[in-house]
Structures are given as C-alpha cells and as structure tokens.
C-alpha cells in the first residue's frame, strides 16, 4: 500500500484543461461551482475567472455584486498565458463592462495563444427562480460582440424567445427559431426545450446544415436550479476532451439528465425541502 502511494505521488497525470468565466453561486448548484464540479466529474481540470458573486439559495437571489472588469480580464489573461486551455465557456457576466472585458480578453489573449479554441456561450439573463441576473444594457454588447466569437450558444426557450422577439411554444416554433438564431449570429445553436410542457425534454442542435435532436424523459416537480450551467459546462468539458460538437452535446445531455435523476435533497431549518443537482455521478 505504502509503495503504491509512493508511486502515485511521483507520477503526474495530464488531463484536458477547460476554463469557465462565470459568477459564483453561494448555494453551489449553478455558476462557477456547478461548472467546476461538472468538469471534475468528466475528467477535466477546471480553471475559473469569476465575474460576480451571487448570494442566493436555490429558490431566491438575495444580492449580486459584480467584480471589477479589470480583474475579470486579468484572471483570463494570466490563465491563458500559463495553461493549455482546450475549451472555454461563459456563464453569468453580470454587466456591460464585464462582457466587454471578457470579449477583449478572449480576442486579445486567449484566442491569440489558443487559436480557435471552442467557446461555449450560455446566454444567462434570468435565473430559474425568475430573478434578473444580467443588466439589461449589457444585452446589446452581448449580442454584438460576444455571440459572434462563440462556437456554440445554448439559449433556453425564454432566452431564445427574447432574442428573436416572439415566444416559442412548440417544437415547430423551436425549429424555426433555432434556424433564425443560427443565421442571425452565424454560430451553432443548441436550443434547449426543457421549458416546453411535454413528456420529454427535447433540445435541438443547429450546426451547419444539420439539425440534431436530443431527448430525455422530463422529470416533473424537480427544482432545476443550475441545469443550464451544468449542461454548458459538460459540453465544454467534452469539447476540451476532443469530442465533436454533436458528440459533446450527446454526452452532456446524458450527464445533466443523470444529475437531475440522482438529485440530492435536504430539509431546511424551517422545514422546507431543498433540492440540488448531483454532480458527483
Ligand atoms: O442558473 C443561472 C445562474 C448562473 N450563474 C450564477 C447563478 C445563476 C442562478 O442563480 O447564480 C452565478
């Protein structure tokens, strides 16, 4: 045993490296914490650039505080200069200044060093609880500067509906909306249909001329705090491991479905139920 331990402590392992640029969720079901747990579960070393700190429980955001834009830029820049980053994702970016700093760091440093490393953009604007997370004035720069440098956008139906200016109520409307977004931003789109009321959660991937469908049984009555973050982190981990976009989404969908199915549950001090995704699967 001692011998084995010795040998292990002397050998170094190389695993793929991925970067998440996102906010901190104190309840650890979403945001940077969900991303890191997902990266670890999928065998990827996760780096982080924190954009803001959110004090919250799974049901309610209490307070959001952005980090200074320059330190957001610096986190990304030092990591890009020192680690072999194979893929990156963005989550909650909070303010227009932070979106601007992230775009600058990706173009001027990360992509200068890492060429066209895949960038997954999860356009987080509203929490599952309904709380606004992104400053409204940040949307213009988000669309104008961040979307065009993404490899994949992962909007849910609410976010996609806002971007095209009309609600998406069925699968037919999803097909139309996804194509529209793909053309509008010239980027691949994963449109997540989990908010449609059906027996299964269907997502559509629009990449090139192809539309691929991913479905899983819909689990009703389950708090879904953090599913979007977990999904985009799992896609990023799979891309960092060298999978194609379609294979990465397929693997990520399985991971999110399992993290919901094997969810965790506690009773709060006041007797309420607290659910959380299980990332240790
Ligand atoms: O699920 C969206 C989200 C993303 N990032 C952070 C969050 C939340 C939701 O609350 O707190 C940091």
Image (cartoon, rainbow, N blue to C red):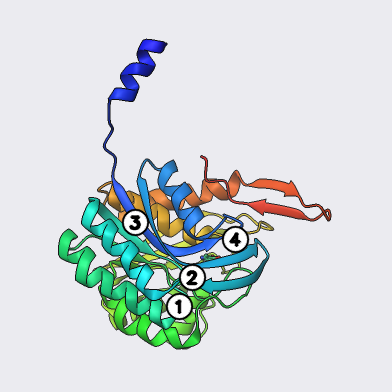
Q: Is mark 4 within 8 Å of ligand 1?
A: yes
* Residue bearing mark 1: 160
Please tell me whether residue 106 is drawn above or below residue 141 in the rendered image: above
Return the residue at label 3.
19
Of discs 3 and 1, which sits in the foreground?
3
How far apart marks 2 and 1 lie (CA) works out to: 6 Å
Q: How far across and how far down the image is residue 220, in percent?
A: 66, 57
- Give me the residue at 16% from left, 65% from top: 112
Secondary structure beneath dot 3 equals strand
Q: Earlier in the sequence, mark 3 or mark 1?
A: 3
Q: Is residue 176 above or below residue 192?
A: below
Answer yes or no: is residue 189 visible.
Answer: no
Q: Nearer the viewer, mark 3 or mark 2?
A: 3
Residue for badge 4:
225
The residue identified by callout 2 is: 156
Residue in the picture at 65% in, 58% down: 223
Mark 4 touching mark 2, by CB under 8 A?
Answer: no
Say if mark 2 contacts mark 1, CB within 8 Å: yes
The Cα atoms of the two marked residues, 4 and 2, are separated by 13 Å
> Distance between the Cα atoms at labels 3 and 2?
22 Å
In whole angstroms, how far apart are the C-alphas of marks 4 and 1? 19 Å
Residue 229: percent from left, percent from top: 48, 60
Residue drawn 52% across the image and 50% down it: 257
Binning the other alpha carbons within 10 Å of mark 4 as few (below 14), some (14 to 19) or many (20 upward) gives many
Disc 2 crowd rating (10 Å Cα; few below 14, some 14-19, many 20+) is many
Of helix, strand and loop, which one carries label 2? loop
The quadrant of the picture showing ligand 1 is bottom right
């Amino acid at each position: 045993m001692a011998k084995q331990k010795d040998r292990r402590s002397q050998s170094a392992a190389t695993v793929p490296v991925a970067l998440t640029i996102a906010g901190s969720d104190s309840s650890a079901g979403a945001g940077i914490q969900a991303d890191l747990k997902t990266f670890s579960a999928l065998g990827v070393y996760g780096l982080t650039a924190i954009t803001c700190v959110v004090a919250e429980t799974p049901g309610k955001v209490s307070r959001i505080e952005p980090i200074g834009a320059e330190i957001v830029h610096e986190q990304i820049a030092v990591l890009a200069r020192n680690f072999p980053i194979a893929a990156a994702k963005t989550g909650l970016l909070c303010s227009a200044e932070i979106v601007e700093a992230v775009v600058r760091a990706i173009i001027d440093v990360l992509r200068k060093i890492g060429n066209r490393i895949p960038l997954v953009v999860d356009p987080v604007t509203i929490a599952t609880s309904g709380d606004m997370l992104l400053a409204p004035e940040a949307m213009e720069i988000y669309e104008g500067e961040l979307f065009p440098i993404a490899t994949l956008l992962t909007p849910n139906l609410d976010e996609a509906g806002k971007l095209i200016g009309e609600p998406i109520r069925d699968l037919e409307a999803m097909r139309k909306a996804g194509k529209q977004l793909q053309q509008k931003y010239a980027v691949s789109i994963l449109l997540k249909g989990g908010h449609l009321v059906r027996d299964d959660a269907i997502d559509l991937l629009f990449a090139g001329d192809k539309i691929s469908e991913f479905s899983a049984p819909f689990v009703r009555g389950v708090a879904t705090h953090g599913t979007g973050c977990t999904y985009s982190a799992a896609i990023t981990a799979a891309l960092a491991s060298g999978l194609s976009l379609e294979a990465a989404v397929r693997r990520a969908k399985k991971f999110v479905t399992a993290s919901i199915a094997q969810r965790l549950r506690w009773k709060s001090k006041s007797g309420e139920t607290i659910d959380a995704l299980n990332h240790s699967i």
